Amino acid sequence: MSKEDIKELIFDGSRIHDIPSFYDEVNRVFMKGADFTLGPSLDAFNDVLHGGYGAIRGNEPICLK
């Protein structure tokens, strides 16, 4: 697998100041183009990390920065 095959997702830490802004950033990065957003839930965040909707499709490799 080459570097070109790995999707890069970039968190902007300067946008995160509290729990609500963390989930705003999660939605900005992971849910771009989706017709829904995640609520403030670690279970939902875990689900999005496993892929299948939002920015991660299936079992594709990602690099989270």
Image: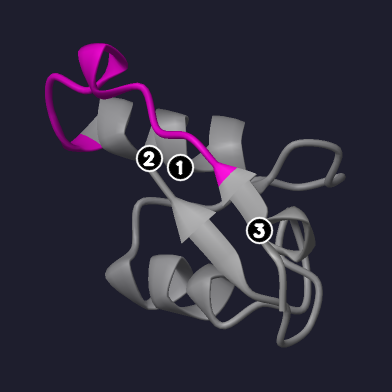
Q: Amino acid at mark 2?
A: Tyr
Whole-percent x, y for residue 3 in the image: 66, 58
| Mark nearer the viewer, 2 or 3 | 3
Q: Which residue is mark 2?
A: 23
Q: Which quadrant of the figure contains the N terminus?
A: bottom right
The part of the chain drawn in magenta is 9-19
Query: Who's the residue at 41% across and 76% down the image?
Result: 46
Depicted 14 relative to depicted 42: above or below: above
Q: Which residue is mark 1?
A: 26
| Mark nearer the viewer, 1 or 3 | 3
Callout 2: helix, strand or loop? helix
Mark 1 to mark 2: distance in Å? 5 Å
Q: Which residue is mark 3?
A: 3
Query: Who's the residue at 74% across and 36% down the image?
Result: 32
Binning the other alpha carbons within 10 Å of mark 1 as few (below 14), some (14 to 19) or many (20 upward) gives many
Residue 26 or residue 6, whichever sits in front: 6
Q: Residue furthest left?
A: 18
Count the labels in the image: 3
Q: Are marks 1 and 2 in contact (CB under 8 Å)?
A: yes
Say whether residue 34 is magenta.
no
- The quarter holding residue 43 reads bottom left
Whole-percent x, y for residue 10 in the image: 48, 35
Q: Residue furthest top?
A: 14
Query: Who's the residue at 76% across and 47% down the image?
Result: 36
Say how the picture is coloured.
one colour
Mark 2 to mark 3: distance in Å? 28 Å
Q: Amino acid at mark 1?
A: Val
Binning the other alpha carbons within 10 Å of mark 3 as few (below 14), some (14 to 19) or many (20 upward) gives few
Callout 3: helix, strand or loop? helix
Q: Earlier in the sequence, mark 2 or mark 3?
A: 3
